[in-house]
Amino acid sequence: MPKTATTEPACTICLRAPVGELVAAKDASATEGAPALRRFSMVAYTGGAMRLAGWQHPVVVDLAGMQIPAGPSGTKSRPILKDHNPSLIVGHTESVRVERSQLLVSGVVSGAGAVAREVVESSLAGFPWQASLGASAENIESVPTGRSAQANGRTFDGPVQVVRRSRLGEVSFVALGADDDTSAQVAAGDTKTHTPSTPTRENNEMDFEAWLKDEGLDPETLPDGLRSAIKAMWDKAQARAQQPQTPASEGTGDGADDDDNAPAVLARIDAEGVVSGMRAEAAGEAKRIADVRRLCAANGGRRDDTEARAISEGWDAQRTELEILRADRPKVGAVGGAPAIHTPDNTVTSQVLEAACLLTAKLGDVEDFCEERDLDVAAKRFRGGIGLQELLLEAAWANGYTGRSFRDSRSVLRCAFQPSAPNVAAGFSTIGIGGILSNVANKFLLEGFFSVERTWRNITAVRNVSDFKTVTSYRLIGKDQYERVAPGGELTHGELGEEQYTNKADTYGLLLSIDRRDIINDDLGAITTVPRKLGRGSGLKINDVFWSVFLNNSAFFTAGGGSFLTGAQSALSIDGLTSAETAFMDQVDSDGKPIGVMPALMLVPTSLSAIGTQLFKSLELRDTTASTKFPVANPHQGKFRVEVSRYLGNAQYAGSSIKAWYLLADPADLPVIETAFLNGQEAPTIETAEADFNVLGVQMRGYHDFGVNLQDSRGGVKSKGEA
């Protein structure tokens, strides 16, 4: 795909960015008597490429094009959430800025709910929170393989998608960002400005739990043994604080009274390594609670009672899952009353069967294609995966089949693809197995389509056609330069003619079958292997058609038209490339004036790939012959992007050559060749149906509607590469 900048409807993206540092500290600006707010700061995005769900290639957000909403007094405050959920409020920003190609965010934990407390307490316990920013992508640049793009002071090689313009919405605390290797270091506060409160006569009424919270510890998660040890020393310090102070009892500073000094308790324990163990235990407790909440939310919706019991009674993830499974069993009411049966919704639908197929085939990012409920039902109903026979039987049963086995395979296939009339008349829900197989197959079709060479896509213009008729495009020519306006203000009439170029789409297709042996063998892999073959076949066909048309160019590139060079000087070298560049730029329009289009890329066969790459990348090309003078600077370095195709030198195609090469304009400026796609569909389509009567099995057909034709020879120069 050529490097293009596309403006699309704004879409929300969650960029889970690598985090360099995340610090939670008490707000020094809190007023006296008011609760102290924790502050945070984070590196929300480091400017690198990220792998995001739903995006085909790595994503880079260009911070130079990120819009940060502004308020009356500067940057507008942005919400800080947890897991991008608007109902899980953590706080808000006070500063959002870009420094050293990184997005830096700081603010306060102003949320008043349990979510904000969870973030702070788990941070203090050592949990490595990461950051994820939510932004709307308003302009996306797709960079193909072989090209590169600049963003955030770096160079990114394709394939990559660069979000050139975006708008910041919010930033979230997340447990795992896009880079799984990153971690955040969390501090409890600034020890230079915060000192523990000391129990004296003025504060000796402070209860123990309030003192623990003031020191940044959670009384509920504190281990019993450590709590008892701290409490004993705290009580001793409280009692001593109530005694009259004498110079002798105030301490000599030699450490003899450390046990009586309550603020010294934590420092001493930490020095002995106990606090580190406590924090590790607290982090484990935070993970246990997170696992419990995840299981309760994923299995049958909200389970407030189960979740509360699991957290309070210390259940681990395994115990929680077992209790949920027990709760899902049918429950019968008291004797004499109507039975009260609770059964989870495990109805098998088309979406559930599709999810089961994708899970069995181990498709990556399956969550992007299926609803969570369908994935859950599929995982529970078809443990270990679904077979092809089981898939067809489920569809047949839903469509009115009354048999219980696959013995009558013809009847199973008939009911799976064609619901029985009584079942349809009764209004029962039916399952379209053809649609399921087509949807599953299309997920694997593109894998095969993109597995073959796609150099053709980088040198062609693309046209969208609505039918199979020949379409004609026109390019205006003639006298179109401005003329000097006479004193009377009358403008001179221009003279315009037109040049015509045509193209036409045709249909190419192939039919493959999943035969009775695959079905009897219960081979679900057949519905992934066949579409991959169909996709690869489509990719090979478009290459075959495209390069057959392109290489049939003996009457297209001509010496008389200035677009064909021959002779030893046409070989690919500094001199040869200079000659081709000169010939390209000397081409003229119908008025004999320069066409004003610049060459952009070199198209070479595999045999010239190395020298083409040298001419594009090398700063110097040294001549070691006995010449009295030779240049070392490469005047063409970085000028023309190199595209390599194995079809150019393949002897099966008329016009092929291992020495000929081309200098072409960007196809968006002046294309030498154009590819037309019906309704803009650049990828093939696959459909599934029951096989004909004389074939036992399932048929899949793939088809692709496209056409290729040469356009304007002035968009390129062909060099023969030999005399």
Image (cartoon, rainbow, N blue to C red):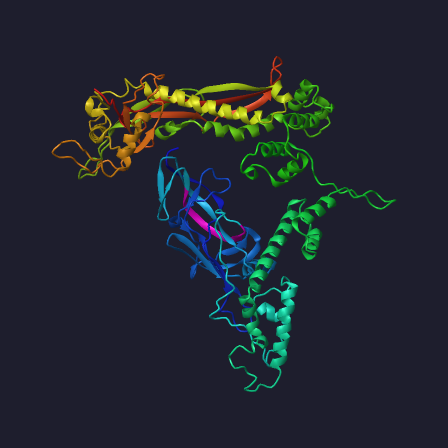
Q: Residue drawn at (58%, 57%), measured in percent from left and top?
A: 283
When asked about the image quadrant of residue 435, the answer is top right
Where is residue 491 shown, x and y percent of the image?
22, 35
**Residue numbers of the magenta segment:** 162-175
| Up-down relation of residue 390 to residue 516 (above or below) | below
The one of 537 and 350 positioned closer to us in this rendering: 537
Where is residue 548 shown, x and y percent of the image?
36, 19
The one of 357 and 678 positioned closer to us in this rendering: 357
Task: Point out the residue furthest to the top here.
Answer: 694
Q: Residue drawn at (55%, 83%), measured in percent from left and top?
A: 250
Q: Quadrant of the N terminus?
A: top left
Q: Residue drawn at (49%, 19%), measured in percent from left and top?
A: 509
- The total of numbered circles placed on residues is 0
Where is residue 458 shown, x and y percent of the image?
36, 30
When asked about the image quadrant of residue 339, the answer is top right
Q: Quadrant of the C terminus?
A: top left
Task: Point out the residue furthest to the left here.
Answer: 628
When asked about the image quadrant of residue 620, the answer is top left
Where is residue 290 shown, x and y percent of the image?
61, 52
159 magenta-colored = no
Whether residue 684 is visible here, answered yes or no, is yes
The one of 165 and 444 positioned closer to us in this rendering: 444
In the rendered structure, the answer to whether residue 644 lies left or right of residue 293 reads: left
In the rendered structure, the answer to whether residue 542 lies left or right of residue 710 reads: right
| Up-down relation of residue 81 to residue 223 (above or below) | above
171 magenta-colored = yes
In the rendered structure, the answer to whether residue 569 lies left or right of residue 99 reads: left
Whether residue 679 is visible here, answered yes or no, is no
Task: Point out the residue furthest to the right here.
Answer: 336
* Magenta part, dominant SS: strand
